[in-house]
Image (cartoon, helix red, strand yellow):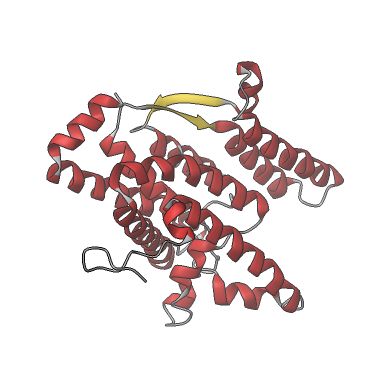
Amino acid sequence: MAEVYGFYPKKRSIFNFLSVTSILIIVNIITFIIFLILLVFFRNNPGLLYEYIALKPSNIFQGMYLWTFITSMFMHGGFEHLFFNMISLFFIGTFVERIIGRKRYIWFYIISGLIAGFFFVFLAYFFGVNTLMMKVFGNPENFGVGASGAIFGLAGLLAVLIPHKKVYLIAGPLIAIVIQATLNTFYSSSSFSGIANILITFYIFMAIFTMFSFNERTRKISIPIEMPFWLLPFVAIVPLVIVGLFVDLPIANTAHFGGLVSGLVYGIYLKNKYSKKARYLSKHFG
């Protein structure tokens, strides 16, 4: 192999051509497929598989399955959950990666996901002591999975660095999830609930796909709501916390809040350390 100025030429791999966001999406998809395969072997006791992969507050405080802080970040509860998170990661993650660079991005993504997990575990274990408190802080016996904690970290970072950038909250799928959870809570045993779940799931996928339409009327199916970036993560958390007081939502708001806090803190750090660049970003995307 020829030398160039005394150094061997750097080998190039597929990771040099893919963005970190693309790699994270691929990893999440692969781990989800592996999980589905493992479910075949654990079909008689799927709960045991969740014990090994998902994050459960009571397990952590018994010193069990500590690795689930990591594995839960790359696992999802269903295809719908995976798809929605990966769409969010693609748009928000691509933006963050271009602003802070590949190395900072991957480390921040992992750390914000871990902090989200810590919030999920500690708030549920110490404050989820009765039915009302569990609705706010979570049940210590519930499992938590998903990339959304880390994604909220990315959103929190952008909320500090480019607070006035106009973005869209795709409200349709969130509203559909709330309706679905409400039906499952009050009409779980009725045939109407089963049909409604199918229709709602269909709408969620349709709403996500219509986001990419060039037709403005078609995009309205997903109910996009324009707002400044600083408001986005709060609007995505607070209403769901309030609704969660009355309906059991399959959403870990405490993990989202933990990720958001990590993003806000890191954003403030970067804004103070690189004040000129931060001002340029805020002005450019204002």
Q: Residue at x 37, y 64 (%)?
A: 118
Residue 98 x/y as whole percent: 34, 42
Q: Going 60% across and 30% down the picture, which residue do you hit?
A: 212
Residue 73 falls left or right of residue 3: right
**Quarter location, residue 285:** top left
Would residue 44 be visible to someone looking at this image?
yes
Write the residue at 55% across / 66% down: 143
Residue 258: name its quadrant. Answer: bottom left
Camera-nearest residue between 238 and 128: 238
How many numbered circles does the render carry? 0
Viewed as shown, does residue 9 lie left or right of 85?
left
Outermost residue to the front:
2
Q: Quadrant of the C terminus?
A: top left
Q: Nearer the viewer, residue 209 or 59?
A: 209
Q: Is residue 203 left or right of residue 263?
A: right
Outermost residue, bottom direction?
63
Percent across and percent down for residue 284 are 27, 25
195 above or below 218?
A: below
Could one spot residue 145 in this view of the protein?
A: no
Residue 117: horizontal and vertical position, in percent? Answer: 41, 63
Q: Quadrant of the N terminus?
A: bottom left
Seen from the viewer's position, the closer of residues 107 and 139 is: 107
Whether 18 is drawn above or below 272: the answer is below
Residue 223 found in image quarter: top right
33 in relation to 213, above or below: below
Residue 186: where, in percent of width, then height?
72, 46
